[in-house]
Image: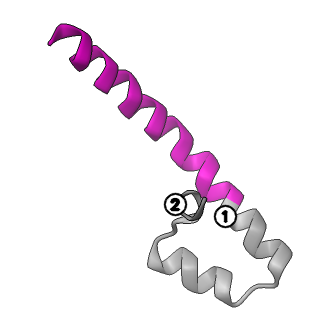
């Protein structure tokens, strides 16, 4: 579960200075932004796998 909350250094430092609720919202936002990228990588990997 910790991989879902991976952040860049700037986001991590910003979250460190906030309270727990704001930090959780920032983690959720990072996950929401990363979700389309991960889905795209999955689609490309599936296409490559099928053409192999």
Q: For this view, does 19 lie left or right of residue 51?
A: right
Q: Which residues are magenta?
A: 28-52
Q: Residue furthest bottom?
A: 17
Asked if residue 8 lies in the magenta stretch, the reply is: no
Residue depicted at x 60% and y 58%: 30
Which quarter of the figure is the C terminus placed in? top left
Quadrant (top left, top right, bottom left, bottom right) of the N terminus: bottom right
Residue ranking furthest to the top:
51
Q: In the image shown, does 2 or 6 lie closer to the viewer?
A: 2
**Tag 1 residue:** 27
> How far separated are the C-alphas under marks 1 and 2?
11 Å
Q: Position of residue 9 (x, y in %)?
A: 46, 79
Is tag 1's residue or tag 2's residue first in the polypeptide sequence? 2
Q: Which SS class for mark 1? A: helix
Disc sitting over residue 3 in the figure: 2
Most extreme residue toward the front, as rendered? 1
Q: Residue at x 18, y 9 (%)?
A: 51
The residue sitting at 57% across, 65% down in the picture is 2
Would you say 44 lies left or right of 17 here? Answer: left
Q: Residue furthest left?
A: 52
Q: Is residue 48 left or right of 16 when viewed as pictured?
A: left
| Residue at left offset 25%, top offset 10% | 50
């Amino acid at each position: 579960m910790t991989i879902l909350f991976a952040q860049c250094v700037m986001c991590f430092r910003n979250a460190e200075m906030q309270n727990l609720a704001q930090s959780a919202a920032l983690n959720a936002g990072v996950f929401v932004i990363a979700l389309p990228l991960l889905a795209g990588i999955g689609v490309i990997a599936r296409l490559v796998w099928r053409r192999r």
